[in-house]
Amino acid sequence: MKNISFTPRMLLTAGLLTLGVIIAAVPKNTTKPYKLSAKQILDELKSGTQYIEPEQVAQMLVEKDPFLQLIDTRPQNEFEKFSLPGAINVPFDAILSDEQAELFDQNVRTFVLYGNGTTQANEAWMLLRQLGYNNINVLRGGLNYWAEAILNPNPPAGITSNDDLARYNFRKGAGQALGGGEQPAGNDVKPTGGQKAPVQPPKGKKKKVAGGCS
Amino acid sequence: MGPLVVNEIISDNTNLLLAFFIGIAFGFVLEQGGFSSSRKLAGVFYGYDTVVLKVFFTGAVTAALGLLFFSLFGWIDLSFVYVNETFLHSAILGGVIMGVGFIMGGYCPGTSFCGAAIGKIDAMVFIVGLFIGVFLFAEGYPLYEKLYKAGYMGSPRISEFFGITEGLFTLLMIIAAVLMFWGAEWAEKKFPREEY
């Protein structure tokens, strides 16, 4: 067997080709800070894609959607007094900590931010979107609207469309399932036309979850 | 992390200072590599000395690998790296003029200053020619403006243009560079010159 001696040229060639193969094979690094430009953020804000309707969240909660993750942006003491089922507390001032980075840096779960209103949740949404995290949503109206719409819904007054009735019945059903309101069973407002009103989110309210390739 | 200026890790003035030192080092390396000799540069066209080709492609391969690995490790954000705008027609025409000047004069703009710094008269003449060219271009600009701005393509990267990943393009460039290195060495043996 002959001894093969490597000249510096051959070593250099082999080294360069190895590095080239490595860089061609690894996926591109896309985890970079500040991925969205100010203009992209503005476009998303204008179109309001960050909002998710309370009905949709309630539906996901009732169905125990494993991908839903509610994020409570209020301070800890408020969170301990009341929070939505399954929510975790990420106070607004801790939104940029390293633990939160690990929490948000993924593409599987649907995050829904909420506070008492929407201001703070929106601010958190902007920061998180600017950092390039996906599937971040804001609960429309925050907890105040949630209490009004889901936990203690008012029956629609007067002559209303079937959609309104369906929404009311859904809200009431969901509210009871989620531990709000003290409505006696069996007083469903029946929609006209003999249609059954199952617990379902109203039509046309299902919003596409922002993120992914958007 | 990077780029340092864009992320305000260093100031604009520090950036200029760094550029000054890098420029000095660049000139020093050019001179030490023999680039201040016009014969060495012309040699690449005749095949007796291909060090220029090797240096340029080593530079390109090193920079590409360095940037991509830095990006992979999260040390630099490539979307913030400035890419010159491409005007296709003037790029082609400029490349031809530069190549002709290169082989006739034996210098490129950078190496001519290198040569002038160590007292080469041909390099100084080349610099005079360079300024005459700049003057003619500036004075005659309205004549060439249309051609100068034709074929605008924005700031494309070759990998985007061909629709392949940056890593794959770099691998192809490395293969091409290595083949050229071996071809260049072969040419040096085939067309040797005793003294130049």
Image (cartoon, coloured by chain):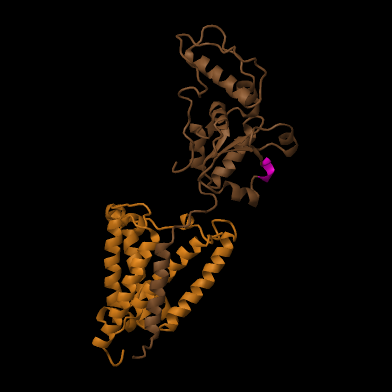
In the image, residue A108 above or below residue A147: below
Q: Residue at x 65, y 49 (%)?
A: A97
Question: Can you say which quadrant of the picture contains the C terminus of chain B?
Answer: bottom left
In this view, the residue in front, B40 or B67, is B67
| Residue that protrudes farthest toward the front in the picture | A186
Q: Residue at x 68, y 41 (%)?
A: A91
In this view, the residue in front, B5 or A52, is A52
In this view, the residue in front, A46 or A192, is A192
Q: Position of residue A171 (x, y in %)?
A: 57, 21
In the image, residue B53 above or below residue A204: below
Taking A175 as reference, is B179 left or right? left
Q: Position of residue B27 (x, y in %)?
A: 46, 77
Residue B11 visible to the viewer:
yes
Say if the magenta span includes residue A93: yes
Please identify the quarter of the rendering in which residue A149 is found. Answer: top right
Question: Can you say which quadrant of the picture contains the N terminus of chain B?
Answer: bottom right
Chain (brown):
A
Q: Position of residue A202 (x, y in %)?
A: 49, 22
Q: Residue at x 26, y 89 (%)?
A: B192
Say if the magenta span includes residue B177: no
Please identify the quarter of the rendering in which residue B8 is found. Answer: bottom right
Q: Residue at x 46, y 33 (%)?
A: A208
| Residue that protrudes farthest toward the top in the picture | A158
Q: Which residues are magenta?
A: A90-94
Residue B112 visible to the viewer:
no
* Image colour assigned to chain B: orange
